[in-house]
Image (spheres, grey):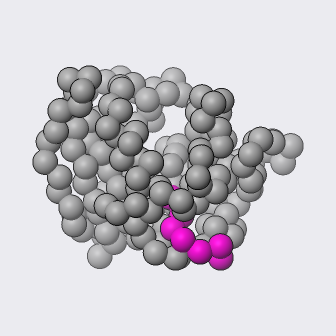
């Protein structure tokens, strides 16, 4: 997927998941695949990233806001402040606001935000990590509304963990 792929108005979801669908455990990612982090930076490019409050808070402070991208944090808490990011309180309004600025919008978590944004998305950038882990957050189910358009080969991380990149488009 090209840098920031997805033109103006595009809404994408990007996640890494275990082979059994886990994307998170205790507010973190239960594996370390540096190549996936580099892929994430490439995919989200210079677009807008939209995340839930807990995802924002799970990012190490030195990476908040995610550099080179407009950061939107979705929360129901009207008093919440996210230094360096824009706080939004409605998913549709946040997507509309981001789309009006041009460029793609990438939803980066968490589980509830992915689930709510799935119907609004036109692409998914998915990394499959070849592990089975315990976790409390799972990736949404990709159903027949989606077509696999990029089926990357298995690769081995410098950490020894296998992974692969997939790209889905809405039919």
Across and down, in percent, residue 119 comes to 46, 66
Residue positioned 31% across, 24% down in the render: 133
Across and down, in percent, residue 131 comes to 24, 28
Q: Residue furthest left?
A: 153
In the drawing, does residue 36 fall left or right of residue 54? left
Residue 48 seen anywhere in this rendered image of the structure: yes
Establish if 150 lies above or below 77.
below
Q: Give the range drawn in magenta.
A: 100-106
Across and down, in percent, residue 153 comes to 13, 48
Establish if 75 lies above or below 138.
below
> Which of these two is toward me, 68 or 143?
68
Across and down, in percent, residue 132 comes to 25, 26
Establish if 78 lies above or below 32.
below
In the drawing, does residue 108 fall left or right of residue 66? left
Residue positioned 31% across, 57% down in the render: 142
In the drawing, does residue 21 fall left or right of residue 5? left
**Is 34 a magenta residue?**
no
Residue positioned 53% across, 59% down in the render: 46
**Is 102 a magenta residue?**
yes
Residue 21 seen anywhere in this rendered image of the structure: no
What is the quadrant of the C terminus in the image? bottom left
> Which of these two is toward me, 144 or 39?
39
In the drawing, does residue 130 fall left or right of residue 117? left
Residue positioned 77% across, 41% down in the render: 83
Q: How many numbered badges does the structure rendering display?
A: 0
The image quarter containing residue 1 is bottom left
> Which of these two is toward me, 66 or 124?
66
């Amino acid at each position: 997927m090209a840098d920031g792929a997805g033109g103006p108005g595009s809404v994408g979801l990007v996640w890494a998941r275990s082979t059994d669908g886990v994307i998170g455990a205790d507010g973190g990612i239960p594996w370390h695949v540096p190549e996936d982090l580099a892929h994430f930076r490439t995919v989200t490019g210079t677009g807008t990233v939209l995340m839930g409050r807990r995802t924002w808070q799970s990012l190490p402070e030195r990476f908040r806001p995610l550099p080179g991208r407009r950061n939107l944090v979705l929360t129901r808490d009207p008093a919440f402040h996210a230094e360096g990011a824009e706080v939004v309180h409605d998913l549709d309004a946040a997507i509309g606001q981001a789309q009006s600025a041009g460029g793609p919008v990438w939803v980066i978590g968490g589980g509830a935000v992915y689930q709510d944004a799935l119907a609004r998305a036109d692409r998914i950038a998915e990394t499959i990590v070849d592990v089975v882990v315990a976790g409390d957050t799972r990736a949404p189910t990709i159903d027949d509304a989606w077509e696999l358009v990029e089926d990357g080969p298995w690769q081995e991380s410098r950490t020894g963990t296998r992974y692969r990149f997939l790209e889905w488009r809405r039919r």
